[in-house]
Image (spheres, coloured by chain):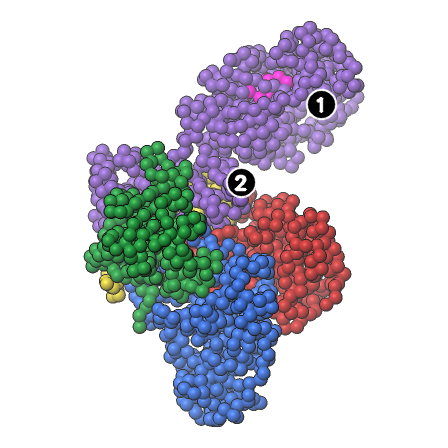
Amino acid sequence: MSRIGVFVCWCGSNIASTVDVEKVREEAAKIPGVVSAVDYKYMCSDPGQNSLRNVIKEKNLTGVVLAACSPHMHENTFRKAAVKEGLNPYFVEIANIREQVSWVHEDKERATAKAVDLMKMMVEKVKRDKPIEDVRVPLNKKALVIGGGISGIQAALDIANGGVEVILVEKEPSIGGRMIQLDETFPTLDCSSCIMTPKMVEVNQHPNIKLYTYSEIEDVSGYIGNFKVKIKKKARSVVEKDCTGCGECWNACPMHKNVKSEFNINLSERTAIYVPFPQAVPLVPVLDRSVCLHFKKGGKCQKCFDACGPKCIDFSMQDEIIEETVGAIVAATGYDLMETSMYGEYGYGKYKDVVSGLQFERLLSASGPTEGVIKRPSDGKTPQTIVFVQCVGSRDPEKGVPYCSKVCCMYTAKHAKLFAHKVHGSQSYVFYIDIRATSKGYEEFVRGTMEQDGAVYLRGRVSKIYEDNGKLIVKGADTLSGNQVEIAADMVVLATGVIPKKGSDKLAQMLGISYDKYGFLTESHPKLRPAESSTAGIFLAGMAQGPRDIPESVVSGSAAASKILGLFSKSEYEVEGTISSVNEATCVACFYCQRVCAYNAISRKEIKDRNGNVVKVVANVNPGLCTGCGACVNACFSKSIDVKGFMDDQIYAEIKSLAV
Amino acid sequence: MEDMKVEKNEQKDGTAAANTGSQSDPRLIAFVCNWCTYNGADLAGTSRMKYSDNVRVIKLPCTGRIDPLFIVEAFKKGAKGVLVSGCHPGDCHYTSGNYHSRRKYATFRDLLGYLGVDLNRVEFSWISASEGNKWVAVINEFTDKIKSLPDKTTDIFTKK
Amino acid sequence: MENIYLPKLAEIKEIIQETADTKTIRLSIDGKSIDFLPGQFGEFSLIGEGESTFGFSSSPLRKEYFEFSFRTSGRATTGINGLNEGDKIAFRGPYGNYFDTSKMHGKDIIFVGGGIGMAPVKSIMEYCLDERDKYGKITILYGARTVGDLLYKNIFDEWKNHKDTEFVVTVDPGGETPDWKGKVGFVPTILEQLPLKGENSIAVVCGPPIMIKFALKTLEEKMGFSKENIITTLENRMKCGLGKCGRCNVGSVYVCKDGPVFTAKELESLPNDF
Amino acid sequence: MEEKYFEISSDNLKKFVDRIITDNYEVIAPTDKDGDTFYGKISKFEEANLDILLPKMSYKEYLLPKTETLFEYSISGVDTEVKDGLQGITGANEKRVIFGGRPCDAGAGPIMEKVFNWDYKDEFFNERFKNLTIISIACEKPDNYCFCTEMQLSPESSYGSDILLKKSGDKYFAIVTGEKGLNLVKAYSDLFAETTKDKVPADKDWKKIFEIEKTKSFLDKNFEHNYFQERFLSCIGCGVCTYTCPTCHCFDIQDEGNLKEGRRIRNWDSCQFGIFTLHTSGHNPRVTQGDRYRQRLMHKFKIYSEKFDKYLCVGCGRCSRNCPEDIDIKEVAKNLAEMA
Amino acid sequence: MANTKTDEKLQKIAKDLLESGEVNLIIGYTKGSNPQRMRPVFITKPEEAEKLSFSHNAVQDLAVFLKKQEVKKFGKIGITVKGCDEKAVNALIQEYQLSRDNIKIIGMQCNGVIKQNLADKGETKVSETTVYDKCLICQEHTPVLYDFLVETEEPELSLSGNVKPYAEIEKLDALSTEEKNAYWAKEFDKCIKCYACRQACPLCFCSRCIVEKNMPQWIDTNSEEPGNAQWNLIRAYHLSGRCIGCGECERACPVNIPLMLINEKMARDVYNLFGYKSGLDINAKPVFGVFSESDFNDFIK
């Protein structure tokens, strides 16, 4: 039975001067089901709230309507007051007669009529309110971080330091990601490895971090608080716990000239059993079975096995599936550099001395193939003139991508600067479109490259690069002077754009999170929820979301970590109870609801009979993921799904009450 | 036994005179999302802007929740104009509710027009939480437009 | 010219919340009950929300009110559920046939009710209890799925305290609570355990279709009740209540007119279509 | 009243129709629209299509409208006021004539009258039926779907017609069955010439292809027969058979309106819909379309006859002609008779 | 009538499928209540396969039966489909109502089916004036997807271009709001709310139609002007972007409401707006299950 109380607030004169509050109260009293109607000067004041509570108690109300200010002002206030009297908080509805009546209308009679209408609407709505319980989801307080680059490492460390167990999964044999490939970092020119390796080591030694390298995510199911994750630990052929990282195995490997080093981006070679770089964490080699003679030639070669002191080479090792249950996930899958094959005119791949930005990093790096001495790949000579081409792929909707890769301006300036420092008397030329140097110290850094280090910046695009007599002839336009320029260079460095890591779309699908048309993972809200994915419990960090530099990546890793620590600070995850629910009797499992759900909250549910036979498949709402947006309700043809708090029946009753 | 009173009570509703819902004083129903347009309308209030009092707002969580069938129901119950309003594309609080609904509205609107509903009576807008002035303009223009329409109901939902 | 579809108004005197989703509503017109017989039903409505069919659940001998029990499920019942004491309910009826008590005089009677199907049983049962002397031994068996689904808990004692009357209450296995003192078991199972015999006895049964099916079987095959002495009431979907709209048509009867009360013998002649 | 016999020339028949229209009779006749023929109000004789065997729909809606207001209500606060729908009932015009229907359609009236009066009197039906004058035309060439003969009528039956016209050359014999018809003939006596029964050509010897009693006796004994589930697997439950049927009369009662006013109405309904018998509990006595079509057969050929001593079918064949899946009820009834 | 070669081929396929146990049921056509009608037939035994037949009178869309619970119980089903009907099968798969693995599609090449009212009057010739409008715009005389294809012996439908299919749509589009309103008010006034359009539609597969839901009362139950319009509007809306144009709703309608004028119009609009046609690809996402950021926005202020 409906026992509704209507409370009309004067808001001093804010409402009462334009709305005849007594009239609203009188009209309320006439409505069937309304057992109490009062008006009061300030409903939100303590006495006002007390009177609300008293009436709830005395009249044993089943619903409350406040004709007052916007629900965005005091809905919570009044709900809290109602809860104190044992009323379900969702049985409180607000008719907004201040912001949407008294403050915007002048004719008192008409404003009063409108206020009465709004009050009636809410009475009809509250009559049809169903008790809503907030959803509590138990939390497995363990986090999964996918990707062992700087943002993943930062997230893992922050979470682990917060006392929460972390599983860090890295696809490559070592963590470190892209950052460990870099030489020095802008704008401070501190050595990347110097600041990165301690963090990598910390990860490895942290009691709260379980590290899986050379491992991939195989499957993710479940939802916030309770994700079931399958991790494929690929067969390393080396028993990790026994390995000392002494290097005898790779020194013994006969394949030392034949395999291109991925870490050095084909600028050097590695063996079949290898660590990608000397500071690798863990310092445990991986046996690359696709090139290993033992596997290719029927088990004859076992030089590494023989050389290994602790005997930790295991040719029979199998991929292993590890299952973990975690409460939250960070996706920090990182980035790749764009292919440049569409820029045939630049000759990348054709001319050895046309290299990518990341390759140049390796040439600069003390741990790189040339041990930090800049040598051009073709003949090992030190180049005297280098042309840097920016925006290769970026900001080029025709051939590449329309977005700006953000870091290229800065790393090119860094390259030019380091080139000048390392090769005295050398000359660099930079073709650019715009210089984007917006963070702290960046603009000064670029200026320094130009002014102190003498790099010549040319605003324009390069049209062609070709080889002539041992030189690379770079033809381009200088749009500022309006001249065509032609530079004979020893090397060309292409600042290739940034794209999401290959396969990150697949991972996103597995996680049920959205990604944009380029494959970058999408934030739940680009401004206000930048660390969250659209799926509750899954957070984002680093370049997987889009181009960003190291500090930003670190910040985003920490942001994700703080979100998770915040989430885990409670014993249960609480969600507002205004979520969707399925009428299983009439659901026909067309799954339009699932298609439109932005939160992956809808899954298939099989209804079985007593013998376990599936009699029906229906949609099922995961309360931990549903946000109550109601898109599914709109999508459902048979109206077999409804969202609590805004049920179809309530909306129709509101419309019905407005009939003229 | 007590039979029902058969005579009709003329004076049923004292407030009816204030908004008759007639063509000259039309009833408009606005379905708005909670996050953008409802806040925009609140902003109009806190800014003390004035606008037509013919509109009645029904709040929903998201444009994605605003079923085109609500429009039909509003007309059935005598609304002379129906407004649907939510967050601008890209701004949806729930990521994509307005995009999904936009497809439906575009289609449904075509259907309404084809079946002889005066499309002047159905309005769609994107109004953000900061666009109190746009809310005021949309409501005032819509009210004026409805008032200017011929004084006869050309829709298929009301009994003639 | 009389409009047979025009309802009358009755005032709600009392509302009893029976379970989470069922209620009993007591009505009166001018402070009095109406003339009806146990087993009959009416069409009840909150005008504007549509009619619903309910059997009367009170004894016609209680002259100050008549009542019905209902579960809130659809639009009409939701409307009725929202009403308060003092509000009016539109009502048509009484309709249908009834339990012929004259044939029960001097006999032992077992009343079997399941869930909300107890409502029409309650009417005839209370009618008999109100004139207790006219009947032999009376046994009442009432079962529901769970303890929470039992209606009329507040008047169980009243039923029990009649002389020579046994009241047995049971819930389905798994439906009991820790403090449950009644029996646990399906109605037909408990029924079979009762020390009753079919001679000179009448059984009145109402409940969900599956319960009726098995209870009838038990009464007939295991307890020796003749088909003529087992009486049940059908709960078909109805609209008009007047034998016109065709909905409750089963075999050659309109349940609303020729029923809802049937003996097992009569049911036997009907196709399995209800 | 005993039957009376008149003659009317084709020309006079035209005049008769045009004159009653002029005299404010509402004349409902088969008339062409949308590439088919339907019963509809005509404004002159030419608009009537008398060549068509049967219009697509029956004229049931003039007895039982597809939607009927039982009463209107208005609500003010806790007070409800009701306006009886019988007062000012629409279409109960005294001067309404159904012209040019066939004996099968005419036979439906008295059949329906029984159910609306067997216990409680449905005055909505009665008011309309009372004020309807039915002038039918005997069929000369029934088609393959017709089986009125099997249904205790015949292409020349006057049962249910106030006036039955039988064509003979360029004139018609009018068989007047009662006061209603006679009054009309008398009012236009200049157009009619009285005659005697022996002048009226005798009815042809219409052959039956099956005995409906046998169909019934099959239905009496075979409720759970495979035939129903197998044959009606092809039934899509569209209900066209029931909606176009002149005798199907099932209805639903619904309230419509807003918080202030509204009405209780009854609408046509169909036993072919799954929801028709669905209990609130979710239990449905008739789960399959086979169950539902069986119910229709039972109601037509068994149940109704047991209660009202008439079959609930006039053999017009509309359900067969209109069935989108080509279920032929005549064929079905014949099959059942053969299986009996 | 003797078996045509088409029929023999069809019967052979059906017989093999049933004999091998690949399907438990074949839904096909057989000869109907008069020589100009065909009717659905359900074959479960190989020896009954000879009942199967096909002709330009095979008007029914047999896909409608795939939504029936009684039919679903058979599990693996073979179905005889014309091109238009086959699109319904595809749409059902798209909307998860059917698993491709459970269905064997016997595609019938079809050059048009004769309008049933003409056939009843004795029309036997397939021509642009005797077939349904859908046949004139048909792009799928050979079904999109099939496991078996039975080629036709029927002469190809020749189009002179003089008959404009669904010509009324453009005429209606050109009318004023009031004229459109008047046109449809008149059409919908005929509606008797029998819902045959729904039952005949292979894509109206809801177990409880919105019209049978009354909390809230989505659609007025009355069968008068307001209630009828609501039903027809909402039916059309629910089929926008889903209708595959088989025309069964219109054929089933006992009061001849030109429902295909609405369905076809909406199909065109959806195609114009979103470039989507229903039932062409079982892997395509239904048009209202996805969106594009650049969707038509001009109508929104």
Residue depicted at 56% across the width and 73% down the height: D211
Which residue in the protein does label 2 denote? A611
Could you tell me residue E186's position as x and y percent? 48, 67
Regarding mark 1 in the picture, which secondary structure is present there? strand
| The magenta stretch spans residue A512 | no
Query: Can you tell which chain is drawn green?
Result: C
| The magenta stretch spans residue A175 | yes
Residue nearer the viewer, C74 or B14:
C74
Quadrant containing the C terminus of chain A in the rendered view: bottom left
Protein chain holding label 2: A
Distance in Å between CA atoms under marks 1 and 2? 69 Å
| Amino acid under disc 1 | Val
Location of residue D235 with respect to D23 vertically, above or below? above
Query: Can you tell which chain is drawn red?
Result: E
Could you tell me residue A176's position as x and y percent? 59, 17
Q: Earlier in the sequence, mark 1 or mark 2?
A: 1
Query: Can you tell which chain is drawn yellow?
Result: B
Residue nearer the viewer, A207 or C193:
C193
Which residue in the protein does label 1 denote? A354
- Give chain A's shade: purple
